[in-house]
Amino acid sequence: MEREGAAPADVGPVHERADSRRKRLRLVAAARQVIAEKGLDAGVAEIAARAEVGVGTLYRRFGSREALVRDVLLVGVAEVRALLDRALAEQDPWLGLTLFLSEFSKAQTVNRGLHELTAGNAAALSPELHEGTMILRQAIEELVDRAHLAGALRADVTWRDIVVLSLASAQASACMGVRATDSQPERTAAILLAGLRADDGAPRLPGEPPTDLLA
């Protein structure tokens, strides 16, 4: 449900003044930066400071910190959906899966807020985010089904495996004195994809695939 009297973060009221629009856009840009760096607990003081406005301006425009975070996350969900649309548009299902896993892994690595959203319970944040997440799940399942039908993806890998594997780089910045470079998400995705390709001689995966948390 939309907040009374409010407009989407990137649209704004029809008759919004130019100075008000500039402040709103600065707040949205600042919120995206802070949420990417600090996660869903991003504070209003830091967001307002980066936007060079007062905290009161943030509350007047968005009503609450949670509403601003929600609006920013909805933009992130829309960007992931656009990525999935590009992946599904690929004629080669394997190239589509490669594109999605590589880019989604990178996005979660550089955006802590997106990582926390996808790893958590979107329904607890807002009905809109829950609905958006469910749409993403359906698109990922379609992407994996295409790869299976093409015989490119090993049959015992599920779409749920793919979403779990996309987190492989998200918290892998350093280990045992070794530090990952900025290209690690792409390298990790490439290593994973090498093991995901269909191979009649490969042993069956152990254990059971991931299960659903979302209804």
Image (cartoon, helix red, strand yellow):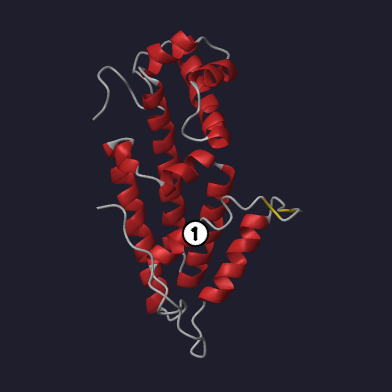
**Residue 54 point in image, percent of width and height:** 51, 9
Give me the residue at 76% from left, 53% from top: 177
Look at the image and tell me in which quarter the N terminus lies.
Answer: top left
Q: Residue furthest right?
A: 177
Residue that numbered label 1 is attached to: 100
Q: Residue furthest bottom?
A: 201
Between residue 70 and residue 28, name the one nearer to us. 70
**Is residue 106 something one can see in this rendering?**
yes
Q: Is residue 50 above or below residue 145?
A: above
Which quadrant of the view contains residue 72?
top left
**Residue 120 point in image, percent of width and height:** 39, 45
Give me the residue at 34% from left, 42% from top: 122
Q: Is residue 68 above or below residue 165?
A: above
Q: Is residue 30 above or below residue 148?
A: above
Kind of residue sitting beneath label 1: Phe
**Residue 161 point in image, percent of width and height:** 43, 66
Q: Is residue 12 left or right of residue 116?
A: left
Between residue 200 and residue 96, name the one nearer to us. 200
Give me the residue at 56% from left, 31% from top: 33
Q: Is residue 57 above or below residue 108?
A: above
Q: Is residue 86 left or right of residue 129?
A: right
Q: Is residue 209 left or right of residue 103?
A: left
Q: State the count of labels.
A: 1
Crowd rating for badge 1 (residues with CA inside 10 Å; few <14, some 14–19, many 20+): many
Give me the residue at 55% from left, 25% from top: 30
Which quadrant of the view contains residue 89?
bottom left
Q: Label 1's element?
A: helix
Between residue 199 and residue 90, name the one nearer to us. 199
**Residue 111 point in image, percent of width and height:** 54, 41
**Is residue 92 something one can see in this rendering?**
no
